[in-house]
Amino acid sequence: MIKIKIITGSTRPGRFNIQPAEWIYEVAKKRQNIEVEFLDLVKINLPFLDEAISASQHKYSQPHTLEWARIIGEADGFVWVTPEYNHSYSPALKNAIDFLYAEWNYKPVSFVSYGSLAGGARAVEHLRGVAGELKMYDLREQILLSNYWENLDENGKYKFNERHEQMANQILDSLTFWAEKMKAAREEM
Ligand SMILES: Cc1cc2nc3c(=O)[nH]c(=O)nc-3n(C[C@H](O)[C@H](O)[C@H](O)COP(=O)(O)O)c2cc1C
């Protein structure tokens, strides 16, 4: 079965990130044909990159790197849920990405982002460049939540609607399709 992993891109106390991350996780869990896992970078708790050798050399030394490599290595595709900080993605997400290399290779990734008017679009554009260097396939399908604070209920919960769910399912359709193809390609290599 195809394994999709959803990664939280913010580790801030009070982060909004957990809401869209948990939401798309719940949508994905309804699917019969994929296994989904929720990876919260707060719980993964990686330090700042502390490997002496670049990840592309694949000579990991730290126990937390080996464990992170195991978690990412078994995945077939990803959703990166990212905030936009100063027109880019978060340092926590970049740090988690930079720990590894081969484990990301030849796997598809899609994005859920949020922020002010641009809805995190600039963060995602930057992540697409990162994905390219990691030999990933960054899907066109993505979700942007513009001015998300205008769409919260009285308890501060984002009001996801049917249109959002449709977009999430488009992401998951594409992610599953390409995850299967790329899994087969990885096995061939
Ligand atoms: C350091 C920092 C920089 C920010 N820069 C931007 C920005 O460039 N564009 C934007 O749309 N929102 C920006 N924001 C506002 C964030 O969209 C908002 O705080 C959001 O809740 C951050 O995600 P998080 O709560 O999941 O950490 C910034 C927030 C922080 C903390």
Image: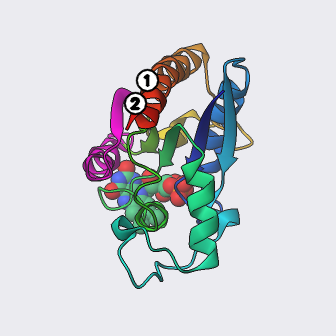
At horizontal 68% and vertical 35% (from top left) the residue drawn is 36
What amino acid is found at the position of numbered circle 1 in the picture?
Lys
Mark 2–mark 1 distance (CA, rounded to whole Å): 6 Å
Rendered image quadrant of residue 107: top left
Marks 2 and 1 in Cβ contact (< 8 Å): yes
Residue toward you, 53 or 81:
53
At horizontal 59% and vertical 19% (from top left) the residue drawn is 165
Q: How crowded is mark 2: few (under 14 residues within 10 Å), some or many (20 or more)?
A: few
Rendered image quadrant of residue 155: top right
Q: Where 100 falls versus 152 (above or below)?
A: below
Secondary structure beneath dot 1 equals helix
- Which numbered marker is on residue 181? 1
What amino acid is found at the position of numbered circle 2 in the picture?
Ala
Q: Where 48 falls versus 22 (above or below)?
A: below
Q: How crowded is mark 1: few (under 14 residues within 10 Å), some or many (20 or more)?
A: some
Considering the image in quadrants, where does the N terminus appear?
top right
Q: In this view, does 33 lie to the left or right of 61?
A: right
Q: Is residue 65 magenta?
A: no
Q: Where 64 falls versus 44 (above or below)?
A: below
Q: Tell me the magenta residue range.
A: 117-141
Displayed-image quarter of ligand 1: bottom left
Residue 95: x percent and y percent? 45, 68
Residue toward you, 163 or 60:
60
Secondary structure beneath dot 2 equals helix
Residue 83: x percent and y percent? 45, 52
Residue 59: x percent and y percent? 45, 74
At horizontal 59% and vertical 69% (from top left) the residue drawn is 66
Residue toward you, 142 or 101:
101
